[in-house]
C-alpha cells in the first residue's frame, strides 16, 4: 500500500484529467514506482490494439484508434515521465468498470484521477467517473481538480513535491486507523505539519437545544471521550508536528473550512467502513469534501478484515 509501487493514471484526455499527470509522475519518481497510463473506450477495440500499426488499423476501419494511440504515446513521452517505467493500458468497456478492473489486475496501490466535480451540485446531478471510482476502488485514490491549490510543481525537466501541510480528517473510529497511518507516513516522509480534524457534527448542537437534565452530562462524556482519543492519536504520531482541531457542525463543511484556513496542501480522508462482505460507499461527507476541497484529496481505503 505504501510506499506506492504501482500507480494508475487513468485519463480521458481532457484538460482536467491531464492536470493530474504531474502528480502521478512526481509520486512515481519518489517511490520508484511503475506508472500505468490507462484509457477506456466503450467502442469495440481490435485485439492488441496498441501493438497494431496505423496502417493495419486503417485497413480494418479502426482509424479512430490511431488517434487514441497517439494521445497515449504523447503522454508516455512527456518530459514529466523521463526515466520512469511506464506501461500503456487500453481497454474496452465503461470507464468506471474498467478502471476498477485495471486496479485489481495490475495490483494498483494508488489511482490518480482528475475530477471535474463541481462545488455545490447534488451527488444525483453530477455523475463523475472519479467520484464513482473513489467509492469502489480497492486502493487509495488521489483526486485532483483544476484551479485548486497544488503541491506538485513542474518546471523544465524538474518536478517538485511541496507537501508541507497535511490535513487529516478522521472520525476516530477503528476503521479509520489505515487513514491515520497513511497521513502519519506522508507527514514523516515529507516533514509536513499535520492537522487532525474531528467534527462532532450536529449532535452537541441538538443536545444544547434540550432542556433535559441529563443533556449536559452526555455532552461532557462525549467531549471527554473524544479528547482522550485525540490525545492517543497524537501519541501515535511520533516525530510529527501535530495540531488537533475539535469542531461542531457539518463534518464536510468543517473539514473544508479547516483546509482553507490552514492552507493545506493535501486532505487525507477515509473512503468508508469495511466489513467481511463488502465496502460501503463513502458517505456524503467524503464526497462533499472532494467536491469542495481547496486542494487535492487522498481518499484512503480501509483494509478488509
Image (cartoon, rainbow, N blue to C red):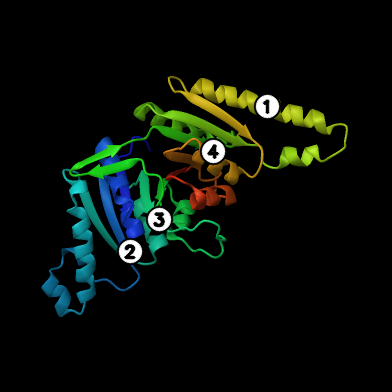
Q: Earlier in the sequence, mark 4 or mark 3?
A: 3
Residue where numbered disc 3 is placed: 100
Q: Is the residue 261 above or below the residue 90 in the image?
A: above
Res. 279 visible in picture? no
Q: Quadrant location of the N terminus? A: top left
Of callouts 1 and 2, the N-terminal one: 2
Q: Are marks 4 and 1 in contact (CB under 8 Å)?
A: no
Q: Tell me the number on the disc at residue 258.
A: 4
**Element at badge 4?**
helix
Q: How many marks?
A: 4
Marks 3 and 1, Cα distance to the nearest angstrom? 38 Å
**Residue holding disc 2:** 40
Of tags 4 and 1, the one toward the viewer is: 4
Q: Is residue 110 left or right of residue 66?
A: right
Could you tell me which residue is drawn at 68 percent across and 27 percent down? 225
Q: Nearer the viewer, mark 3 or mark 1?
A: 1
* Residue 216 position within the rendered picture, expressed as x and y whole percent measured from the top left: 81, 30
Horizontal arrangement in the rendering, residue 197 relative to residue 146 (left or right):
right
- Residue 74, percent from left and from top: 19, 58
Amino acid at each position: 500500500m505504501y510506499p506506492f509501487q504501482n500507480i494508475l493514471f487513468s485519463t480521458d484526455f481532457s484538460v482536467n484529467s491531464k492536470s493530474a499527470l504531474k502528480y502521478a509522475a512526481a509520486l512515481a519518481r519518489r517511490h520508484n514506482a511503475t506508472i500505468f497510463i490507462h484509457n477506456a473506450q466503450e467502442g469495440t477495440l481490435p485485439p492488441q490494439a496498441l501493438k497494431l500499426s496505423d496502417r493495419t488499423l486503417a485497413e480494418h476501419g479502426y482509424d479512430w484508434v490511431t488517434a487514441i494511440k497517439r494521445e497515449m504515446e504523447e503522454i508516455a513521452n512527456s518530459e514529466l515521465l523521463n526515466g520512469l517505467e511506464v506501461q500503456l493500458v487500453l481497454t474496452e468497456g465503461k470507464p468506471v468498470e474498467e478502471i476498477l478492473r485495471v486496479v485489481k489486475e495490475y495490483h494498483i496501490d494508488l489511482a490518480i484521477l482528475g475530477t471535474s466535480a463541481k462545488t455545490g451540485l447534488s451527488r444525483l446531478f453530477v455523475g463523475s467517473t472519479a467520484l464513482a471510482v473513489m467509492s469502489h476502488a480497492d486502493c487509495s485514490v488521489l483526486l485532483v481538480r483544476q484551479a485548486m491549490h497544488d503541491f506538485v510543481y513542474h518546471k523544465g525537466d524538474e518536478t517538485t513535491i511541496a507537501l508541507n501541510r497535511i490535513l487529516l480528517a478522521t472520525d476516530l473510529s477503528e476503521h479509520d486507523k489505515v487513514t491515520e497511518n497513511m497521513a502519519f507516513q506522508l507527514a514523516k516522509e515529507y516533514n509536513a505539519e499535520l492537522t487532525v480534524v474531528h467534527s462532532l457534527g450536529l449532535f452537541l448542537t441538538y443536545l444544547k437545544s434540550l432542556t433535559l437534565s441529563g443533556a449536559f452530562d452526555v455532552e461532557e462524556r462525549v467531549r471527554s471521550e473524544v479528547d482522550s482519543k485525540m490525545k492517543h492519536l497524537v501519541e501515535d504520531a511520533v516525530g510529527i508536528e501535530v495540531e488537533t482541531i475539535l469542531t461542531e457542525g457539518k463534518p464536510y463543511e468543517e473539514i473544508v473550512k479547516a483546509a482553507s484556513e490552514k492552507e493545506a496542501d493535501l486532505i487525507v480522508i477515509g473512503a468508508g467502513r469495511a466489513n467481511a462482505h463488502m465496502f460501503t460507499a463513502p458517505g456524503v461527507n467524503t464526497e462533499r469534501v472532494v467536491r469542495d476541497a481547496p486542494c487535492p484529496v487522498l481518499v484512503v481505503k480501509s483494509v478488509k478484515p
